[in-house]
Amino acid sequence: MNHLAIVRILSILGIWLSGLFVFCAFLAGAIGETSEAIVFFVSATLCGPIGATILLLTDRPTKRTRAVDGLAVAVLFWAVTPLFCAIPFLPLVGESGYLGAYYESTSCLTTTGHSLIDVVATPLPTSILVWRALLHILGAIASITIAATVLSALNLGGPGIHRSRFFTIPQGSFFDSIPRVIRVSTSIIVAASMIIGGCLLATGSVPREALSGAVSAVTTGLVDPLSFDQQPSQGSLQVTLLSIGLLVGTLGLVVLDNVGEGKVSRAIIDPEFLALAGTLVAITLLAFMAGIPLLQAAGWSLSSVSTSGMALSDPARFDRLPLVLVLFPVLIGGSALSAAGGIKLARLVVLSKRVALEFSQLGYRGSVQSFTFRGKRQSEKTVMGVWVYLVGYIMASVAGILILSLSGLSFDDSILAAIGALSNSGHLIGSMLDPLSAYAQIGVILGMILGRLEVIALIPVLKPSFWRP
């Protein structure tokens, strides 16, 4: 373990966070939110100097970094970053205290989006809404970058699933390959959010609604905690723009890269795109059969598969849907290199192809056949990696349900909270009837982080030997 490199990476992150705090502080001061401006400045003075001091007192590492160092940074990012990002939420969470603030920041960073704050009784200050949006963007960039680099190098999703042209295992330091992925994902997320937000403003949306809607769609989160329970105010045009944002957030880097390079035909025949289209059609039909009008069923299907849960129509219509149908799309999730949570479409495509191969071999047991994913032949190691992940996901879901049940939640609410946390779907948690106790908040926090680590990534870091030099 290259501890020096890990510490320096985290200190650089602290400096960047300080810059975001300062931005929000100036914004709060400019719009007259004096108390929020002070809190943001205090946060910046705590975060930035610590990071800068560590950089000044440590030398550049000479030891070559590896993928395990990247995994350590990923774990520490999801666990430590919310400690600092929680500070602006402290005045709003009331009796929940620092745990509630930590819950808020973790929910935003993982793009889960659920909030403990009663935003109906106490509307969020504008600077806090912007802070939530920035955390969603930061979390979406981190999710894509970690999936495309750390998880790809460790083959936690199976070879050929996370691998793309954005990442190849470098000859030198492992961290040398990461800035490229950060630049690409940042460009896509920020540009898409700005374009969709600008279009929403042009259609008559107020700035707060345009900001929260655009960022929520592209990051597949809930910047405004109420957006899962309130339909868009500007009608079908706003719904169309938000749907485009949800597609951008769900498709992932590989498909978007093909579109950006003008290879639209390749993007259309991409297995994840085809799987997404088929999944949306199937879930739409199921919702339609359950009594939801077809167009509204299509919007709900897209919002659910993206694991955002934004209400694209009257949310009251969907109260009639059975729990199994509500959970089904969020468990599937979006593309492997996207901000969406869930099991991910790529894994389901691989398993489907492997099952089809087994059926084709039933009458020819002696035959030797193989299957491909994005033109690359996949081995049994690929299938084994996917199966291990699925077993880990099921075990984590069951454990989460049991833990949350013991914390006092009803069985149905425990299911919603556990699956909502693991799939980073804040609308499921928001639809619970019971409030979250302190113990339940800890359980949901662990679930949200575990969902972004793709479950089995946590197993190696629990061993003391992982952290040794």
Image: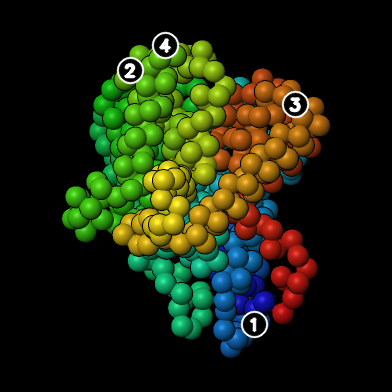
Q: CA distance from mark 4 to mark 3?
A: 29 Å
Whichever of labels 3 and 1 marks the residue nearer the N terminus, that label is 1
Foreground label between 2 and 1: 2
User: Which is closer to the viewer, label 1 or label 4?
Assistant: 4
Q: Nearer the viewer, residue 325 or 307?
A: 325
Under circle 1, the secondary element is loop
Residue at 47%, 32% in the rendered image: 329
Q: CA distance from mark 3 to mark 2?
A: 34 Å
Mark 3 sits on what residue?
A: 409
**In what quadrant of the picture does the N terminus appear?**
bottom right
Which residue is tagged 1?
58
In this image, 190 relative to 227: left or right?
left
Q: Amino acid at mark 4?
A: Gly
Tell me the kind of residue under disc 1: Thr
Q: Mark 2 = which residue?
A: 294
Please provide percent x and percent y for residue 217.
40, 38
Up-down relation of residue 428 to residue 63 (above or below):
above
Residue found 25% across the figure and 33% down from its top: 202
* Three-letter amino acid code at the position of disc 3: Leu
Q: Is residue 23 left or right of residue 439?
A: left
Q: Quadrant of residue 422?
A: top right
Nearest the viewer among 110 and 223 is 110
Q: Which mark is residue 245?
A: none
Residue assigned mark 4: 291
In the image, what residue occupies the spot 40% across and 59% down? 368
Q: Quadrant of residue 208?
A: top left
